[in-house]
Structure formats: C-alpha cells, structure tokens
Image (tube, rainbow, N blue to C red):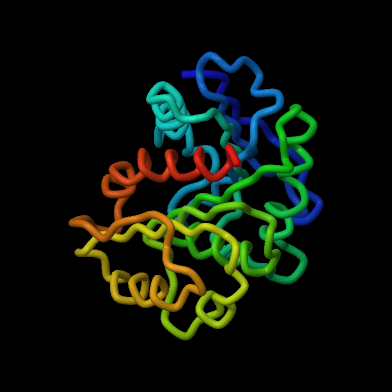
C-alpha cells in the first residue's frame, strides 16, 4: 500500500475540524500530479474509517492490475446527506475545500471523479448534478435514492458525466437504483445488479470494478 494519511483540517464550510483522508497508490510517492477521486462515505462511517475499509488497498490493487494511477481523498460529512443544514455545508466542503486541500498536496484537481456508497452515493450524484462538469465520473454504490427525489429531479444535469451504478439484488433500494439508471440522460457507463445486500461486504466486491472505472475516466 502507498502513502495513506488521516489528518485533521479546519473546515470553514462546516464550521468545525474534520478528518481528511488521502491515499496514494504504492509506487507513486506523494502522488504529485495524479488526478483525484473524492470519496463520500455512507451514514454509518466517517473518513476515519477509510483505512480500515481498505480503500488504499483497493486503489493500489487497481494500479497493480495496470490501471492508470490516481489518488483518493475524502473528509467527514457526518449524517447530513451531503447537503447544507444551516451553517453546516458538507457539500461545499467537497466542492470547494477538499480540492483546495488536494491542490496543496500537489494533486491534479483538473481531473476529478466522485465515489460514494449509500448516503455517499446519493451525495455524489447530487454534487455532480449541482455542479455539472465538476466530476468526470461518478461511482454510486447502492446510492440511497428514492424515485422522485432531488437526484431524480435533476438527473438531466448528469449529461456528459459518466455514471456507474451498482446495487445488490437483495438491497431494499434495488428498484429505485434501477429506476435511476433508466432516468439518466445517458445509460450507465458501468455497474451491475448482482446478489448482495446493503453492506460493505457487497460494496467491497464492487470496488475493484469501481476503481477501474474511475481510473479509465480520469486518464482522458
């Protein structure tokens, strides 16, 4: 595994100190010049959990399989659905502050993607819709969407952004996620609907394909 860090950063958009996570694939030093995939966690996790979830290992494995390298970066957004709540705005943190923190590390923020699971999948899609062109691709693992919600209402904003959708067949969200796939302005560019529940055990099986998808999107 490469350079994996968990730091504390002062987030002005959230009005508090947050955990800031980065991972560079093994063999790529500090990651200077590499594009970035921003990671949005689900409701039961925070950025402090990313090392134990093996995100850095999944990243290095993708590069060892021959995929172009990139870095992972993410920060804690708590359980706010990655939306503004009063003076606490985790969406702005992801859109404005995390890229700035990444630029300070020398990462290439002109090429970015988004990856999230459950609440983080919802937040990734919502962010890509709010700022078209911000991300080249979105990996949404079992995103916590509901037909008719804000993500569905703004789905047209995803035109030009590659979207990968994964969801387990035994997940209560499967019908809504499949409906979102049909509502997208362009068919999903990656993803699958195979056996699995709303657990990280299932998402771990999806992450290799998700990392490959991000890598190919960021190389262009």
Give the left or right position of residue 15, taking residue 5 as reference: right
- Where's residue 189, x and y in %? 43, 57
- Where's residue 166, x and y in %? 35, 57
User: In which image quadrant can residue 188 be found?
Assistant: bottom left
Q: Quadrant of the C terminus?
A: top right
Residue at screen point 60% across, 26% down: 5
Residue at screen point 58% across, 68% down: 158
- Where's residue 3, x and y in %? 57, 20
Residue at screen point 40% across, 71% down: 181
Nearest the viewer among 185 and 197 is 185
Give the left or right position of residue 57, taking residue 92 as reference: left
* Residue furthest front in the image: 220
Is residue 156 placed above or below 82 in the rendered structure? below
- Where's residue 90, x and y in %? 67, 58
* Residue furthest bottom in the image: 148
Nearest the viewer among 86 and 122 is 122
Residue at screen point 32% across, 42% down: 204
Nearest the viewer among 164 and 80 is 164
Nearest the viewer among 68 and 108 is 68
Is residue 62 placed above or below 46 in the rendered structure? above
User: In which image quadrant can residue 63 be found?
Assistant: top left
Is residue 50 placed above or below 185 in the rendered structure? above
Total number of numbered discs in the rendering: 0
């Amino acid at each position: 595994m490469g350079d994996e860090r968990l730091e504390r950063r002062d987030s002005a958009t959230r009005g508090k100190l947050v955990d800031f996570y980065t991972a560079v694939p093994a063999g790529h030093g500090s990651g200077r010049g590499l594009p970035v995939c921003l990671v949005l966690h689900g409701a039961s996790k925070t950025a402090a959990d990313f090392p134990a979830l093996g995100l850095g290992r999944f990243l290095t494995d993708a590069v060892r399989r021959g995929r172009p390298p990139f870095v992972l970066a993410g920060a804690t957004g708590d359980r706010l659905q990655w939306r503004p709540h009063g003076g606490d705005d985790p969406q702005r943190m992801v859109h404005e502050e995390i890229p700035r923190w990444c630029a300070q590390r020398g990462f290439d923020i002109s090429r970015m993607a988004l990856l999230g699971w459950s609440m983080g999948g919802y937040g990734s899609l919502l962010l890509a819709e709010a700022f078209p062109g911000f991300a080249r691709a979105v990996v949404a693992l079992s995103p916590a969407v509901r037909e008719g919600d804000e993500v569905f209402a703004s789905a047209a904003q995803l035109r030009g952004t590659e979207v990968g959708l994964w969801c387990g067949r035994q997940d209560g969200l499967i019908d809504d996620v499949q409906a979102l796939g049909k509502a997208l302005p362009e068919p999903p560019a990656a993803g699958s609907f195979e056996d699995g529940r709303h657990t990280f055990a299932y998402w771990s099986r999806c992450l290799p394909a998700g990392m490959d998808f991000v890598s190919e999107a960021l190389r262009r």
